[in-house]
Image (tube, coloured by chain):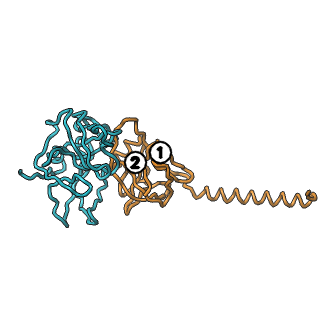
Chain colours: A cyan, B orange
Amino acid sequence: MSIAGHCPNSQSYLGDALPFIQQQYSGNTDAQWHTTPTFTDPNKIRVTSSGTTRNVTSRKPLSQMVQGEAVCKYGTTTLFDCGEISIVPYDPGDTCVPSSGSTYVRVDPNPNAGDMAEGGDSGGPVFHNNPAKAYGTISCQSGVDMIFMPQNFLPNIGVEVDITTP
Amino acid sequence: MTLAQPRRDRVLVRLTLLILVTCVTAACDQGERPSNLFLPTWTLQPGAAAATGELRGHLDERNGCLFWSNGSDFLPLWPTALEIDRDELTIETTSGDVLAIGDGGILVGGERTLEQAESLIGEQIPSRCQAVGGYWMVTEVTMQ
């Protein structure tokens, strides 16, 4: 299970501790991963507060993301919302990720949507469609916009997004 | 009613003593505050992006350092926009509540290494304030 690299290394799920394995919080990577010894973690994305999920069946790398493309996210605080890629690639600066470069993606919220990210949303999935194509994980907030790390940098910490063959 | 001169003098002496005692007590109280308080701060520029992690815990003070404790100690790196009372050791949260030593809450932001923290605040963190848990770049504070 992966979350943002800038999150605390001590994590739990429903009271079960999730052992920390590896992280990077600099440059093109803002991610860490933990094992889940007490349960099986399926490759599904939660999209509603009631627990509805979508299967993840494909991945999209930064090189294939384009301005104007629709993406959605699920954050613990702001829950489900969709927006549009406004800047790709994007350098979010040191207050988002130390020594960052132009390897991140900035997303504007759709009209009438709230903030795309707020405190507590870090590490939430960014995706599109159903079944879902994985785009990345939430890193930062800038005003109402969200900045996410493309999933193709997860191998820097030794993991990748698991997918189900459709 | 007017007081006779000797009695008026005695009252004045007592009042003076009372004021002195009050001042000494207040001074002692001030003396309990750390004289070498280290408050690392950084400036979030308008429009800049910032990490959206969460760190739950409570405010603690030791050796002139303000820690955020939750079983492990983190040293918060406070945004300059936040109101911090260095005498009372209180912090005004994003919603206007006042967080004091022992109060619990959530720090929004992201974890930093010692090197990243020192780069962010532009100065060295004294060894007495170096934290086992890590360093937390704070963007918002909310009370629990």
Q: Quadrant of the C terminus of chain B?
A: bottom left
Mark 2 Cα within 10 Å, few/some/many (few <14, many 20+)? many
Rendered location of residue A67, percent (x, y): 20, 32
Give the quarter of the image for residue A109: top left
Left or right of A155 on screen, residue A7:
right
Q: Secondary structure at mark 2?
A: strand
Q: In front: A114, or A24? A: A114
Can the viewer see residue A91? Answer: yes
Residue located at (52% from left, 53% from top): B90
Q: Which amino acid does the dot numbered 2 rest on? A: Val
Residue located at (46% from left, 57% from top): B59
Sooner in the amino-acid sequence: mark 2 or mark 1: 1
Give the quarter of the image for residue A1: bottom left
Q: How many marks?
A: 2
Rendered location of residue A7, percent (x, y): 30, 52
Among all residues in the image, which is located at the extreme left?
A166
Give me the chain letter of mark 2.
B
Q: Which amino acid does the dot numbered 1 rest on? A: Leu
Q: For the residues labelled 2 and 1, say whether their Cβ atoms are less than 8 Å apart.
A: yes
Q: Secondary structure at mark 1?
A: loop
Against B123, residue A162 (above or below) is below
Left or right of B6 on screen, residue A88:
left
Q: Which residue is mark 1?
A: B82
Q: Are marks 2 and 1 on the same chain?
A: yes
Q: CA distance from mark 2 to mark 1?
A: 10 Å
Left or right of A16 on screen, residue B19:
right
Q: Which mark is residue B138?
A: 2
